[in-house]
Amino acid sequence: MQTLYSLSSFERTETENKQTVARMLNEKLDHVLDVFTVCVLYPIRVAQYAESDSIQRSSRYIRTTEDMNVNTRIATNSYVLKTLEKPSFNEKIKNDKLERFIDEEWVKRIYQQLVKTDEYAAYIEAAPSPAKDKEIIQFIWEKLMLENESMTSMFVDDLPGWEDNSELIVMLMQNFFKNNSRVDFMKLLSPEKKAYAHDLLLAVLEREAYCLELIEPKLNNWDKERVALIDMLLLRMAVCEFLYFPTIPTKVTINEYIDIAKQYSLPQSGQFVNGVLDNLLKELEKEHLIRKEERSGK
């Protein structure tokens, strides 16, 4: 959708160039991957700050017992080390210079908040375990970072792509904490999903005239020019899924595009998209233009 929105300001000759279109989509996918990787890196840097805190406090001229006994276990916990040992993680950070997006003052601030929490106290008192190691890193991300309005505001200002893709990034982070061993930081999508994204993008562009021919009679007295651009793009995408992607159930298509309209468009867009797609689907089914098939495999 974002790629189509960007292309809407291009000359038609440029949108007909498949290489240009593919490049733009790939750039957007790479950008999402950059932001996701930075979000994985942030809580790791917070955990690693324990060692910096220990060194700084032990070097004070007047030291307390607490200064001399800073617990640094979190800096090298199993989840941190497992992530840092992933070749794709290190390669992504190095190749795209992602360390530049890590604000050391924010790392220090979040760490200082962390050590005051009951969750951290329980963590350092408990016997080490992979489950506890993951839980504390996830706690840093979800509770100390994601729920911190000041920090997410900083992301909006300083982390390009966060504002447009925050919900997707949050979902990717949830998946990462469920199973980080399956994450390849050098590619966001599997070859199958990437092919689907490219095929859908090209279908929406190449079949624009036909899709509009189907959509416009269903706008219920709305002038096409008055329909929000994003709503029209979503309708075209949905029609293409109805007609040209046989393994995607129509119900899944409708529900997905209603959700996207609610998130990215106008307050009434979800209801509008729902109404238009329901009417379109009935007509397409009546004319036997919808041909769906079972997905192969599970």
Image (spheres, helix red, strand yellow):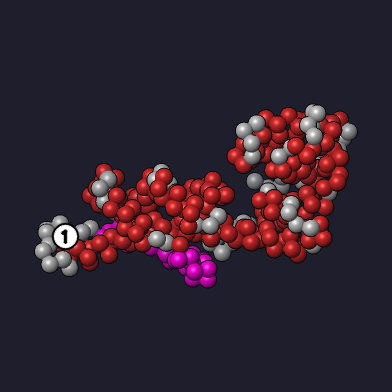
Give x and y (percent) for residue 116.
Answer: 25, 48
Q: Residue at x 12, y 62 (%)?
A: 63
**In terms of image quadrants, where is residue 237?**
top right
**In terms of image quadrants, where is residue 19?**
bottom right
Which residue is at the front of the view, 142 or 264? 264
Amino acid bearing label 1: Asp
Give the residue number, with chain letter if any, for mark 1: 67
Q: Residue at x 49, y 57 (%)?
A: 159
Q: Residue at x 86, y 44 (%)?
A: 210
SS at mark 1 in the image:
helix
Q: Main secondary structure of the magenta part?
A: helix
State yes or no: residue 179 in magenta. no
Where 272 falls versus 172 (above or below)?
above
Q: In this view, does 208 lie to the left or right of 275?
A: right
Which residue is at the front of the view, 230 or 117? 230
Find the magenta span and give its range. Answer: 72-100
Which residue is at the front of the view, 232 or 116? 232
Q: In this view, does 146 lie to the left or right of 15?
A: left
Kindly tell me whether residue 80 is visible in this rendering: no
Where 6 falls versus 253 (above or below)?
below
Give x and y (percent) for residue 252.
Answer: 68, 37
